[in-house]
Amino acid sequence: MKGPLGFGSDDLLQETLQWQRKLVDGLKLLPGVDDVDYGVTAREEVWSDGKVRLYRFVGDTPAPAGQPPLLIVYALVNRPYMVDLQDGRSLVQKLLALGQDVYVLDWGYPDRSERYLTLEDYLLRYIDGAVDHLRTQQGGAPVNLLGICQGGVFSLCYSALRPHKVRNLITMVTPVDFQTPDNMLSHWARHVDVDLFVDTLGNIPADLMNASYLMLKPFRLNVQKYVGLMDILDDKQALEDFLRMEKWIFDSPDLAGEAFRQFVKQFYQGNGLMHDAITIGDEPVQLAALRMPVLNIYAEQDHLVPPAASRAMRGKVGSDDYTEVGFRGGHIGIYVSGRAQREVPGAIHDWLSKR
């Protein structure tokens, strides 16, 4: 008989027995689960500067002759292999299959020797160096740039500073307005004493940043997902997928202290992109200088970069060819979910093909 809550003792017994069976099956399965790896696509190093590496992805089908290279610029806070996580969940794999010539910048793992790297180093040394290498291979022609999250912010600024080097600009889950009311990360960053933070710690430890991100949704990210792990404990493929994602989340580099200081002050605390107040080195950034075609892709359920933060790009860039696409998903799902694999690479390729 059902109780006032809609279930009875028999329901509880069956639920308990089912949980016990999954736990027993999982304990048998776990010893046979290998260390999960990432990356499905072969790649080759084509350029480097210090710890920074530029890789070219090698697909089964060569890109058409004259195809402009597509350079992916990822954030500093996570490893870029999220764009090539595994077979069937790889933005890179899909773009290669569609005929794009895809490259990625790998920032490496900064140590104390990179403590004083600045935003100027990241944009006008590393990104600019990689772009110049690709342009040399293409007879000086401009490249296509795909910036993701913080890498999208870097790509916006770089393209505004060196517009003649960028043919088409694509941004994914990229904030422009860093002070929208629903930006939880901004509420923390805007009130932190970043000078004390950096002067005390030097480089910013990855574990500290991960803890900050997890506490934005503490129940969902610290409790609920691990409770949900019980539902897949007897499914080897699902368990490996879960562990691969966990490996990516916690395989985070430390952040160069000076660049972190500049980024928090100029973008979060000063909201500089909205006020034309960003300076890289001694060069001011004006988004109105972005006159190349721009494709802005945002995630509609993104808790790190709310849609309003990204949609603020409209009206700030100087391009007459501006396209905005909303994706039904979250900040990570936009790379790896089944819906993303069906929709995002094709949208990028179709947009580029028309330009």
Image (cartoon, helix red, strand yellow):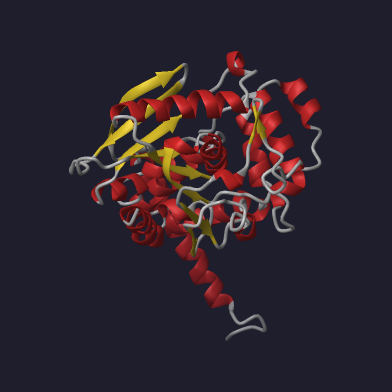
- In the image, 246 versus 29, the foreground residue is 246
On screen, 135 above or below 308? Answer: above
Specify whether 158 is left or right of 352: right
Specify whether 36 is left or right of 126: left
Q: Quadrant of the N terminus?
A: bottom right
Residue plotted at (39% across, 35% down): 104
Residue plotted at (69% across, 41% down): 267
Q: Position of residue 20 (x, y in %)?
A: 47, 58
* Observer able to see residue 37: no
* Observer able to see residue 248: yes
Specify whether 24 is left or right of 65: right
Task: Determine the residue located farthest toward the bottom in the rendered image.
Answer: 1
On screen, 56 above or below 188? Answer: above
Q: Position of residue 151 (x, y in %)?
A: 53, 39
On screen, 104 above or below 171? Answer: above
Task: Determine the residue located farthest toward the top in the rendered image.
Answer: 113
- In the image, 31 versus 344, the foreground residue is 344
Q: Position of residue 91 (x, y in %)?
A: 36, 48
Q: Position of residue 28 (x, y in %)?
A: 37, 46
The image quarter in which residue 188 lies: top right
Specify whether 99 is left or right of 275: left
Residue plotted at (33% across, 26% down): 136
- In the image, 348 versus 276, the foreground residue is 276
